[in-house]
Amino acid sequence: MSRSLPTTSHRPLLWEYARSTESTEIVDIEESYGLFIDGEFRKPKSGRTFPTINPATEERLSTVAEAGEADIDDAVAAARAAFDGVWGSMSGAERAKHLFRLARMVQERSRELAVLETLDGGKPIKESRDVDIPLVAAHFFYHAGWADKLDYLFPGMRPRALGVAGQVIPWNFPLLMLAWKVAPAMAAGNTVVLKPAETTPLTALAFASIAVEAGLPPGVLNVVTGAGATGAAVVGHPDVDKVAFTGSTAVGKVIQDRLAGSGKRLTLELGGKAAHVIFEDAPIDQAIEGVINGIFFNQGHVCCAGSRLLVEESIHDRFVDKLKRRLSTLRVGDPMDKNTDVGAINSREQLEKITELVDSGVSEGAEMFQPDCALPERGFFFRPTLFTGVSQSHRIAQEEIFGPVLAILTFRTPEEAVEKANNTPYGLSAGVWTTKGSRILWMADRMKAGVVWANTYNKFDPTSPFGGYKESGFGREGGRHGLLGYLDWSEG
Amino acid sequence: MSRLDVKKTYKLYVGGKFPRSESGRSYPAVGGDGEVLARMARASRKDLRDAVRVARSALDGWAGATGYNRGQVLYRVAETLEDRKDTFVEQLTMTGANRQAARREVAAGIDRMVWYAGWADKFVQILGNLNPVAGPFFNISVPEPTGVVGIVAPEAPALLGLISRLAPVLVPGNTTVVLASERHPMPAITLAEALHSSDVPPGVVNILTGRKDELIGVLADHMDVNAVDAGGAAGDQLTRIQQGAVHNVKRVVTMNGPTQSPYLIAAFTETKTVWHPKGL
């Protein structure tokens, strides 16, 4: 399918791209997948399966087992046996070598994993290839080295593993979220029951096959596919010691409620509505790129997306004009095309949610801009969208859209910028652009967010803790701090 | 002719003032022999909401103070506690402790306050660090106070238990609403008087006496409370706190193993990570 560059009514066509499609030959998707329990793929006792589709084409990729309660019982029992048996008593140095080996095998199979990620989830191949999969390997490599150095994490602490970790991850960075969860859990000496999102199970299952090939002891990692009911069975299982969840604030609250009084440890990485603050003296062209990356990276399916742009009033018109022009050069479409900037929306359900919120932006009186680009006829796609004239009470300024939609507001003073930036129940991330160093630090001190990107945005690293304030959850992932979520960290 | 004692009226401590409960209620504090020692104010749900409001308004000032400054203020608290040593011993004895144990508890409490005072300008160095990211970026993680913290103080030991939970909340710059020991509330109000005569800004510490079961749900449900220290909560109270915490994803701290620890300070902080590019 060849398409010309999207054009807008007020911007000329700038240049033509030749299509450059990544081959799918490297992946070998099986007709169906079982559950990965105790080191082997098994048919589900539930007897149920569900399809996983390519959101860019709506074609079925495979059929995946749906784990029921009996399957979760088996997975948790396998994880418990592995913890009590081999993994809990293995030296840190040996655990480290297992994790290093996994990191290496991810690198070896990086192309295959990137293609699979893009096919199953819809993200542009250039992102899965250049961001997701390299970070997956980096997470395993970083955490591997901690496995035999836990006593040095925090002075005076005598850390011990917790036991069995039940982990539920989202569909926006499927394999990367697996790495964020699994690598620290295993490095700290825990065993894992992981539930991938129902729309993106394939890379987790591919990782399970890597674990087999790498000789990871059976039961240390168990992958149970399914939807909400499966996730609920994992977090609610009485023999799970630790629950880690990444996903929406609404579901996070359900889990927090479910765990009340259970004595289980919990970390939550939930939603966000990040403010991205642009001061008058910012390096404008760099800031434009930062804003574009902040909201359109991964179709805006990013909990830390810079979805609320706060522009100093004096440069609003100029900035918005440049932003519209840049928006019009984004290539939207086939995720497997290496030129694509904005790929497919992950599911029909998500597309409907985005559409509903964008409609509310229009009906509440904000002014919408979308480039006039053609979208593929099949699959789930949404044009990059921005809204001007947004007020703080608009739903598009309050609710997490989780899509390629930017709400633009203005401010006059740094104090007003801080006030507006913090005017949300969320507190996951924030961005600020200015050339004045003291103002960066002043802003960074005051913005209530777990990650602050100054003169950059959407940067991730395994050494760098990630996680939220307020209703964006608690606990951190990555860095020294991330390991605390998987350790009994009392002294003595 | 014998002199009539002047008895103290025990009130709440809210916003740097000592109000009675707006409800006009009180309840008896009972001594070791079952005698009524004093009538304590029985805080209402409205008293609690008022306390949260003043704790919120005191937050920016206390959190924004330097560690050195907070350390000096907390050390000053230890000084004012030392002044009231005999009063505390007296009160603990009245509630049934033997005098020697009471002395030990008071001394341990004062020493613990000194210990925590010394952390105020150091904990950031233990809990924070540069992160060596794989790219041209400066990247640093630092702990910041979580915000307004509700403390359910342990029923016993009434003084040492309260100091042990209060100090680590104050060190990083949180403000707090405390539900004092219900059975032995007098030392908490005497502590409030010590805080009041030190340099702790009004509203940073607010102490309520009353029926915990009446107040815990309101504290747990409150949308402007960021965390609850449930170290002193009984089993069903803990469950109630964890259920209420769901409304605004409160942090519920249950850690009650370590008696004094920088990691108890850590439990009342949020880690903030800041990135900035390096380049010309």
Image (spheres, coloured by chain):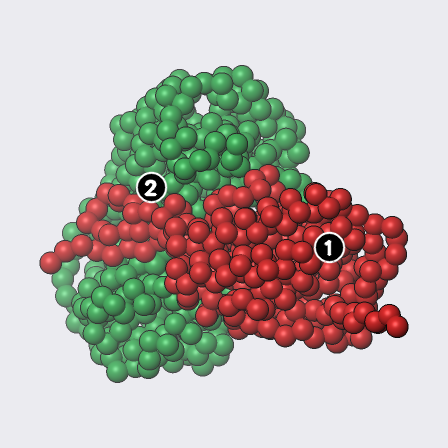
Chain colours: A green, B red
Residue drawn at 56 percent across, 20 percent down: A84
A99 or A112: which is nearer to us? Answer: A99
- Real-space Cα separation, disc 1 to disc 2, in angstroms: 55 Å
What's the residue at 37%, 29% (across, down)? Answer: A149
**Comparing marks 1 and 2, which lies closer to the viewer?**
1
Q: Amino acid at mark 2?
A: Pro
Q: In the rendered view, does B88 fall on the left or right side of A296?
A: right
The image shows residue A112, relative to residue A338, as above or below, that is: above
- Would you place residue A87 above or below residue B97 in this image? above
Q: Which mark is residue B90?
A: 1
* Residue placed furthest toward the front: B1
Looking at the rendered image, the quarter that the C terminus of chain B falls into is bottom left
Q: Is residue A299 visible?
A: no
Residue B177 drawn at (x, y percent): 62, 63
Question: In this orientation, which residue lies closer to the viewer: A237 or B69?
Answer: B69
Res B99 label? none
Q: Which chain is indicated by disc 1?
A: B
Image point (49%, 18%), residue name: A89
Q: Which residue position is annotated with label 2?
A: A462
Q: Chain of mark 2?
A: A
